[in-house]
Amino acid sequence: MPGAYGAASLGPPRRMSHDPLRLLPGVELLGQVEGSGLREAPYYVRRVDGEVVQLSRLLYVLAEHARPGRSLEEIGHAAGAELALRVRPDQVHYVLEQKLHPLGLVAGPDGAAPKLERLDPLLALKFRVGVIGPRVVRAVARPLTALFGAPVMALVVCALLAFDAWLVGVHGIGHGLSHVIEHPTLMLMLLAVTYVSLAFHECGHAAGCLRGGAQPGAIGVGVYLVWPVLYTDVTDSYRLGKRGRLRTDLGGVYFNCIFALGLAVAYLIWGFEPLLLAVVGQHLIVLDQFMPWVRLDGYYVVADLIGVSDLFARIKPVLRGLVPGRPLDPRVSELKGWARAAVTAWVLTTVSILIAMTVVVAVHAPAYLSRAWASLVAQSEAVGHAVAGGDVAAVAAGSLGGLFLLLPALGFLLVYVLLCRRLGVGLAVSRTRATVTR
């Protein structure tokens, strides 16, 4: 997601082969945001490193006309005609050098490009690595766009609801649970099905993006806290209207519904009870994705409904604005009235949920760690017996069980360290500012 205004720092100059103070090759002008919650809808520009920054109309128009081969006079004349303003060459030079160059959009006065620094939003995906290239992703997603037709969507939802009613009200999942308890290695099968469904989930985002007319990028792997997760680059969806962006956001969970329906059909054909657990698992994935307090699909749905790109960046300004006598931060005052109310509600609920989760984790962490350690010891003993008996499937199942016991503990520790680091940096910056202003 784009940051509030982007970030870049000047590093060692690198010579460029084009005119100085001109738009860098590879920079994409995505256009004005539709359905924005800001009083003046911003314009989005994608840098060569994939980060998206927001610009005012003035800066966007100047960037749009700052093409290689054009003089400052030509840029000022073309931009001034579009803005109905008189723009002098020295004003063009100032904006390009002092505003757009630090953002990483244009070359410097000597033809040098800025050293770009990727944004580090709170609770964002880390260590992203593309696995499937954009060309392959688009080839796979193109036929899947037909699944977003209204009749197909209605059929999927109605059929899945009917199966769920039968599963909950008539059949239940008791037989499936018994199968898995009697044969623990079936957990490997359920785990494999889960990861296949997650890959299909990402195809849903790509297909939703392509259905709206935008071009999805690569599908890759990253780390969210400590969990390995898949992601899809759908940055290009920012050029779409609100409906297209919401289709992209919801495409993943919609494809989970399709996958669940496919599992249901497979059960009706073969009667294999553990498949019903996989169906329930898809519903749990959907519910998990709808949580709007972390950067999952639900968060982006809320952000696109409100029309505000990075809600986490507005937590601190909103909380400060609630203190009587404090002036409003520009990141709050620039919001429309209804959008400000919605963002404030999201901030208050998010802070409350995160504090409650922190308290619960802190209170129950000792007991959890004790039980986790006991389970880990038991898992290790079971893996040892499986190794001695040559049971490869049991070794794999026990090893994965141990890994899943360790990851939550590592996640709690990592979140604690990240929060302490951010609080420490914020405190240091506040003290420095206070010292400077004395």
Image: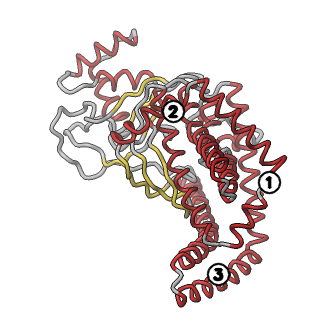
Q: Earlier in the sequence, mark 2 or mark 3?
A: 2
Label 1 packing within 10 angstroms: few (<14), some (14-19), many (20+):
some
Q: Earlier in the sequence, mark 1 or mark 3?
A: 1
Picture residue at 83% right of the left edge, 48% below the top = 170
Question: Residue 96 appears at what percent x and percent y?
Answer: 31, 30
Q: Is residue 317 above or below residue 128?
A: above
Name the residue beneath numbered marker 1.
Answer: 172
Q: Secondary structure at mark 2?
A: helix
Name the residue beneath numbered marker 2.
Answer: 208
Q: CA distance from mark 1 to mark 3?
A: 31 Å
Picture residue at 53% right of the left edge, 90% below the top = 388
Tell whether label 3 touches label 2 (CB within 8 Å). no
Q: Secondary structure at mark 1?
A: loop
Residue type pointed to by label 1: Gly
| Comparing labels 1 and 3, the label whose residue is closer to the camera | 1
Label 3 packing within 10 angstroms: few (<14), some (14-19), many (20+):
many
Q: Is residue 307 above or below residue 417?
A: above
Q: Is residue 103 left or right of residue 406?
A: left
Picture quarter containing residue 402?
A: bottom right
Name the residue beneath numbered marker 3.
Answer: 376
Residue type pointed to by label 3: Leu
Q: Earlier in the sequence, mark 2 or mark 1?
A: 1
Label 2 packing within 10 angstroms: few (<14), some (14-19), many (20+):
many
Residue type pointed to by label 2: Gly
Q: CA distance from mark 2 to mark 1?
A: 33 Å
Q: CA distance from mark 2 to mark 3?
A: 41 Å
Could you say which is closer to the camera, residue 338 or residue 236?
Answer: 236
- Whether residue 314 is visible here, answered yes or no, is no
